[in-house]
């Protein structure tokens, strides 16, 4: 029916004309039950369109007319069916007009009717009847979701999905999958939402239903942004944009640009955020979509962050936008716009006005997005600070970070757990600045632990095998080999690279779908840290307001030392890293070694002068535990003159170090030595190491496969891997060790039931390479530490094969003699620190 088509395309006036024409045709037909049934069906559809244009009263009058005519029918079953259809239609218009609580009851009659038919019918019910049941379940789910009854909504959607699968309703099946994912997202269960989006995306990809896939991709990207995966969402949206532009799907292009702007805003890419938001806003306004207001909010937010001076115009724009969003039922976004206005008023020192705007905002709901919650806490903290109440400001910061922690506690996969930190970044920066200004070293220590490296605060739960993830990683491994061969043969690689990127993305997202990553450990307290340190010292570096500082814990005392401008320090660390990479190759010409070595020593001296010498009066000759920040993660501390030959352990946080140091596990005396391909010197190296470890298992050649290495890693006391490796900048969990059958990925380490206690990564720079907001350090070594490995020895930069072999021979010799890992590594590095840039990570 054309009227129905017009109605489905939201063209109510045209639908009304066609429905009235249909009624006129029916009136000319002889009186009969068929004519009455037709009139009822036309009337209840007409009622929906009338409701869109003339409101509830006109719609109810039309529905009542349909009911009176339905009551004329003698067929009781048909009469009940039509009453169910009328009630469903009335429920739809009640829902559309913003009364979801009242709408719920209107879908019950159709559901009850079909259920009764299904239970009493002698023959299977028709697919049309099942479709009506599924449609009413879906509509009732939307109504329940709107009034925050998430469990009821999801139950109805799951049932509709099962019906669509059982009765092969091909169009409803992906629709219900998508709706279930949206319901979980709306309920705040982001981990489950991400899993469901992956399910429906894979289904639609297999069915080649690109038109439906684009909508799923948009909602999926929004869920990724809500959890903090701005980089992953940005990459996915960058891939989707060219395809959508080519297909000229203008609404989808505009929405993708809007979400891309949101990802850029989270990543502090303000120019990109404004550019994308403006493009999106223009397209959406042109199409008459109310979503233009959401794009405008992103652009305004980025503009406000860039503005050197806050003007009244910016505030008024935010308030106007808030009113427009509220008028269009975009409740959360309207509140966010008002929050922005309040924050701008605080920045203008109009505290009364800012406080009044905050007072107008209701408390967050259970399903309020976490990024909105963090913004509210941030504005409250900034207001308290502007009023001179530092204590209240810190209280709001702590409560906000606690809320963020509650979200993090429910997530699965390292990538998700580490990503959430982006939402608490501004709160953390504010708190650290306040505490540092107070010169309270003990309080600063506590806040550093509260704001950094939260990934390592979890005790991993026992792994549940995921065959699909294992299969996808095997595919990534195979595609990697194919890509390498194609490159060597001079064949085109573009298609293979695209397939590899897609397989990596799917594997990564499957990793998000795991059970909760772990049980949260309590944050390390100073008393416990001091007791565990004993005669050692701990140095936690921090950057705040452009300045570097250190919190030093030594001899039961805690001191704050200000170290001056951070820019030069971080630049020196970066330059040192580059120099060490350049020094790495074996058999460099002596003149080149001399020039590069001089540059490296210059940077090491600069770091010594800025970072270590100001602390000497506190740390003396003690062994050190260093908690770095930013590019300091890449510093091999043995190259610093004042630390030459001194045992140093690098840890992501005091909490992570304490947990690793106090971890108890029975010794197994299980030693594993692994040799990867293309290391000609390694035959002799492993033979020499095996002499130190008589019962060691040696895997080399065809035995050194990813599966066998993983099998033997499980439960090992000591593992030494001589293999090339590579860090993956865009996806740290695909950092890899090259083995005989291809790479072993950091992703796969989550499959270990009992992680090895002590791991040496001898021939590759796979330390804590990727640093996310909140000093969340990821990479191959990071995955091992987060998974429960106590100590990882790895290179902070590239290292020559022969140099690595010599350093590791010295290291194992000291280990066997009884030295602790940090002591053994200090002795090994001391012989040639700039060519042996290793770190002892974890507990040491």
Image: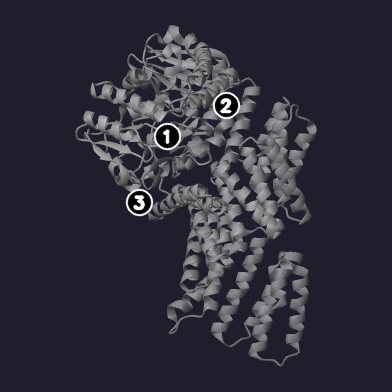
Give the farthest residue toward the bottom.
30
Q: Could you tell me which residue is drawn at 43 percent across and 22 percent down?
A: 835
Q: Which mark is residue 796?
A: none
State the quadrant of the C terminus. Answer: top left
The CA span between labels 2 and 3 is 39 Å
Label 2 SS: helix
Residue 714 visible from this viewpoint: no
Q: Which mark is residue 429?
A: 2
**Location of residue 634 with respect to 166 vertically, above or below:** above
Label 1 SS: helix
Mark 2 closeness class: few <14, some 14–19, many ≥20 residues within 10 Å: some
The CA span between labels 1 and 2 is 23 Å
Percent coordinates x, y for residue 180 in the rendering: 52, 58
Residue 238 or 286: which is nearer the viewer?
Answer: 238
Q: Could you tell me which residue is drawn at 49 percent across and 39 percent down?
A: 728
Percent coordinates x, y for residue 662 in the rendering: 31, 27
Residue 791 or 32: which is nearer the viewer?
Answer: 791
Label 3 SS: loop
Look at mark 1 in the image and give the residue it sits on.
Answer: 782
Residue 30 left/right relative to 640: right
């Amino acid at each position: 029916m054309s009227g129905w088509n017009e109605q489905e395309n939201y063209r109510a006036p045209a639908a009304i004309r066609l429905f009235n024409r249909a009624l006129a045709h029916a009136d000319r037909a002889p009186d009969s039950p068929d004519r009455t049934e037709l009139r009822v069906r036309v009337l209840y559809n007409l009622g929906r369109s009338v409701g869109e244009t003339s409101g509830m009263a006109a719609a109810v009058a039309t529905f009542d007319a349909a009911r009176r005519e339905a009551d004329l029918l003698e067929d009781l079953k048909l009469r009940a069916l039509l009453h169910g259809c009328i009630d469903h239609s009335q429920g739809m218009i009640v829902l559309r007009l913003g009364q979801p609580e009242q709408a719920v009851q209107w879908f019950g009659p159709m559901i009850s009717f079909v259920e009764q038919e299904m239970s009493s019918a002698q023959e299977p019910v028709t697919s049309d009847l099942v479709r009506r049941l599924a449609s009413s379940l879906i509509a009732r789910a939307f109504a329940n979701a709107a009034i925050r009854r998430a469990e009821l909504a999801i139950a109805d959607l799951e049932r509709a999905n099962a019906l669509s699968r059982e009765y092969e309703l091909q169009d409803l099946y992906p629709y219900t999958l998508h709706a279930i994912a949206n319901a979980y997202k709306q309920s705040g269960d982001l981990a489950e939402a991400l899993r469901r989006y992956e399910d429906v995306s894979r289904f639609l990809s297999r069915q080649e239903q690109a038109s439906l896939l684009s909508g799923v991709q948009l909602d999926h990207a929004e869920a990724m942004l809500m959890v903090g995966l701005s980089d992953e969402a940005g990459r996915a949206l960058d891939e989707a944009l060219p395809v959508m532009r080519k297909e000229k799907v203008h609404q989808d292009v505009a929405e993708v640009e809007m979400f891309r702007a949101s990802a850029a805003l989270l990543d502090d890419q303000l120019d990109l955020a404004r550019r994308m938001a403006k493009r999106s806003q223009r397209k959406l306004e042109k199409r008459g979509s109310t979503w233009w207001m959401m794009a405008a909010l992103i652009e305004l937010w980025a503009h406000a962050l860039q503005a050197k001076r806050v003007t009244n115009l910016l505030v008024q724009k935010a308030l106007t936008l808030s009113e427009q969003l509220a008028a269009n039922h975009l409740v959360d976004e309207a509140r966010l716009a008002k929050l922005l206005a309040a924050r701008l008023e605080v920045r203008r020192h109009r505290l009364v006005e800012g406080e009044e705007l905050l007072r107008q905002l209701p408390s967050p709901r259970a399903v309020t997005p976490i990024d909105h919650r963090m913004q509210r806490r941030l504005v409250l903290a900034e207001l308290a600070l502007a009023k001179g109440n530092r204590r209240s400001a810190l209280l709001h910061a702590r409560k906000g970070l606690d809320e963020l922690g509650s979200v993090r506690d429910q997530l699965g996969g390292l990538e998700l757990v580490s990503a959430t930190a982006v939402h608490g970044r501004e709160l953390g920066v504010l708190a650290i600045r306040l505490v540092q200004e107070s010169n309270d070293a003990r309080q600063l220590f506590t806040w550093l632990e509260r704001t950094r490296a939260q990934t390592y605060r979890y005790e991993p739960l026992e792994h549940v095998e995921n065959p699909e993830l294992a299969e996808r990683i095997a595919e990534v491994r195979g595609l990697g080999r194919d890509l390498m061969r194609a490159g060597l043969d001079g064949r085109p690689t573009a298609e293979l690279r695209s397939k590899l990127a897609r397989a990596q993305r799917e594997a990564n997202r499957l990793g998000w779908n795991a059970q909760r990553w772990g049980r949260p450990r309590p944050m390390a307290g100073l008393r416990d840290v001091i007791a565990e340190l004993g005669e050692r010292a701990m140095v936690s570096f921090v950057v705040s307001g452009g300045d570097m500082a250190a919190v030093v814990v030594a001899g039961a005392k805690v001191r704050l030392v200000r170290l001056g401008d951070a820019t030069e320090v971080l630049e020196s660390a970066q330059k040192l890293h580059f120099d060490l990479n350049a020094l790495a190759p074996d058999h460099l010409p002596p003149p080149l070694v001399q020039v590069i070595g001089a540059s490296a020593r210059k940077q090491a001296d600069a770091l010594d002068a800025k970072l270590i010498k100001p602390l000497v009066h506190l740390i003396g000759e003690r062994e050190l535990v260093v908690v770095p920040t930013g590019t300091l993660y890449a510093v091999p501390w043995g190259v610093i003159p004042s630390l030459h030959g001194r045992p140093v352990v690098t840890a992501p946080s005091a909490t992570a170090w304490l947990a690793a140091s106090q971890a108890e596990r029975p010794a197994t005396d299980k030693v594993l030595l692994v040799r990867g391909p293309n290391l000609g010197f390694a035959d002799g190296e492993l033979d020499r190491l095996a002499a130190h470890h008589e019962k060691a298992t040696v895997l080399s050649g065809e035995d050194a496969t990813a599966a066998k290495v993983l099998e033997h890693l499980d439960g090992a006391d000591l593992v030494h891997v001589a293999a090339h490796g590579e860090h993956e900048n865009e996806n740290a969990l695909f950092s890899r060790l090259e083995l005989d059958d291809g790479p072993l990925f950091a992703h796969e380490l989550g499959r270990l039931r009992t992680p090895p206690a002590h791991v040496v990564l001898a021939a590759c720079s796979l330390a804590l390479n990727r640093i996310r907001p909140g000093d969340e350090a990821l990479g191959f070594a990071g995955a091992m530490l987060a998974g429960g490995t106590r100590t990882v020895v790895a290179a902070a930069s590239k290292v020559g094969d022969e140099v690595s072999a010599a350093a590791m021979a010295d290291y194992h010799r000291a280990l066997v003699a009884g030295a602790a890992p940090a002591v053994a590594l200090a002795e090994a590095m001391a012989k040639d620190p700039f060519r042996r840039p290793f770190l002892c990570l974890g507990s040491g």
